[in-house]
Image: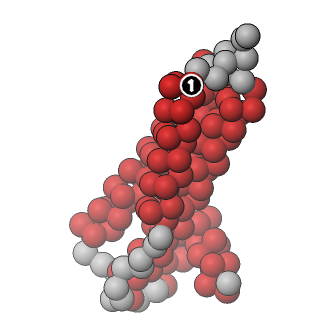
Amino acid sequence: MIDFVKDVRLWFAPQRLRAEGETPDYRFSLANERTFLAWIRTALALVGGGFAVDQFLPDLRWGVRVGMALALLAVGAACALRAVHHWVRCERAMRRGEDLPLSPFPVLLSLGVGLVAVAMMVVVLLGWTSRP
């Protein structure tokens, strides 16, 4: 828990990372940043998908539409938060000469997106609309 609090502080003051270990080869830091940006793009796509489900599928039953939209929005928010947290952890590990941190998040993200996709397929197949 203490490490997590330290990591969150680094989200807002990344210059503090310079006090940790040695400066890694800049190519590794830039690769870490590109990975961060890829996670942010994924988060934005999920958030956009959540809004799209809510705004452009008005004929779906309210509970189904809102459930799928909230699931996508929640996964998008988690992805954005995970992006910065993982960036800090990787940058710190590179500076300390440690192994890069492993995370179960990619599996959880895949499961979340997969569940929403299956729910959407069921909706498409069964045609759950609010109209009689």
**Residue lying furthest top:** 132
Residue 40 is situated, as x and y percent measured from the top left of the image, at 47, 49
Residue 113 is situated, as x and y percent measured from the top left of the image, at 49, 47
User: Dot 1, how many residues are within 10 Å of its Cα: few (below 14), some (14-19), or many (20+)?
Assistant: few
Quadrant where the C terminus sits is top right
Residue plotted at (75% across, 26% down): 62
Residue 8 visible, this orientation? yes
Picture quadrant where residue 127 is located: top right
Residue 129 is situated, as x and y percent measured from the top left of the image, at 67, 18
Residue plotted at (50% across, 25% down): 125
Vertical placement of residue 106 versus 127, above or below: below
Between residue 116 and residue 10, name the one nearer to us. 116
Picture quadrant where residue 66 is located: top right
Vertical placement of residue 75 versus 33, above or below: above
Residue plotted at (54% across, 42% down): 116
Vertical placement of residue 42 versus 95, above or below: above
Residue that carries the numbered disc 1 in the rendered image? 126
